[in-house]
């Protein structure tokens, strides 16, 4: 009988990946980044262990969306008070906080558990082309989408 491989958190080797979001479609980019954060791209993936890599996304302000999402897609937040529901369209969100749209898209594709919150801490997103993680030597991540 063969044993299944189960990764241990002490044995996980993490790399740093750099993603340029310029011209990328928001949902497809977020799905690929979520896969890398979870570690599903590695043969050592284990569901109960965080085996993912660090991901740095730059040029979030130059993200693309399809269809009428710029005007129709809404983001909601609530203050907790009666009548405190706030709504903002994707178009206004990209003008006000361009990195927030990418951050929310990736966060909502991760598991809604303690492990998912830990995975999300390895995600860094920046609106412009500069990032402070040059010392970690992030490798460019190739995003391949079937058209």
Image (spheres, rainbow, N blue to C red):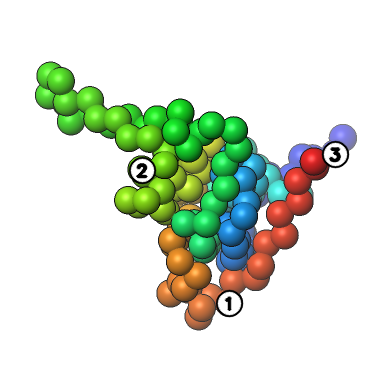
Disc 2 target residue:
92
How far apart in space, not on screen, are marks 2 and 1 (Cα)?
Answer: 33 Å
Depth check: 23 or 43 in front? 23
- Judged from the image, the secondary structure of the residue bearing numbered disc 3 is loop
From this viewpoint, which residue is outermost toward the top?
82
Answer with the quarter of the image where residue 6 lies. top right
- Tell me which numbered mark, 2 or 1, is placed earlier along the sequence: 2
117 lies above or below 61:
above
Residue 115, given in percent of the width and then of the height, sits at 47, 41
Say which element carries label 2: helix
Image quadrant where one finds the N terminus: top right
Residue under pointer 1: 137
Is disc 2 surrounded by few (<14), some (14 to 19) or many (20+) residues within 10 Å? few
Residue 81: x %, y % from top left: 12, 24
Residue 136 % position (x, y): 53, 75
Quadrant of the image occupied by residue 142 = bottom right
| First of labels 3, 2 by sequence position | 3
| Residue named by callout 3 | 2
Image quadrant where one finds the C terminus = top right
């Amino acid at each position: 009988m063969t044993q299944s491989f189960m990764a241990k958190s002490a044995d996980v080797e993490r790399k740093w990946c750099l993603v340029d979001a310029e011209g990328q479609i928001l949902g497809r980019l977020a799905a690929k980044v979520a896969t890398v954060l979870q570690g599903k791209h590695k043969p050592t993936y284990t569901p109960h262990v965080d085996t993912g890599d660090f991901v740095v996304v730059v040029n979030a302000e130059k993200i693309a969306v399809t269809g009428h999402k710029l005007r129709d897609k809404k983001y909601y937040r609530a203050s907790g008070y009666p009548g405190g529901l706030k709504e903002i369209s994707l178009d206004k969100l990209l003008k006000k906080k361009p990195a927030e749209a990418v951050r929310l898209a990736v966060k909502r594709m991760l598991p809604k558990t303690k492990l998912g919150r830990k995975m999300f801490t390895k995600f860094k997103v920046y609106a412009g082309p500069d990032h402070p993680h040059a010392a970690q030597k992030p490798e460019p991540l190739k995003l391949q989408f079937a058209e």
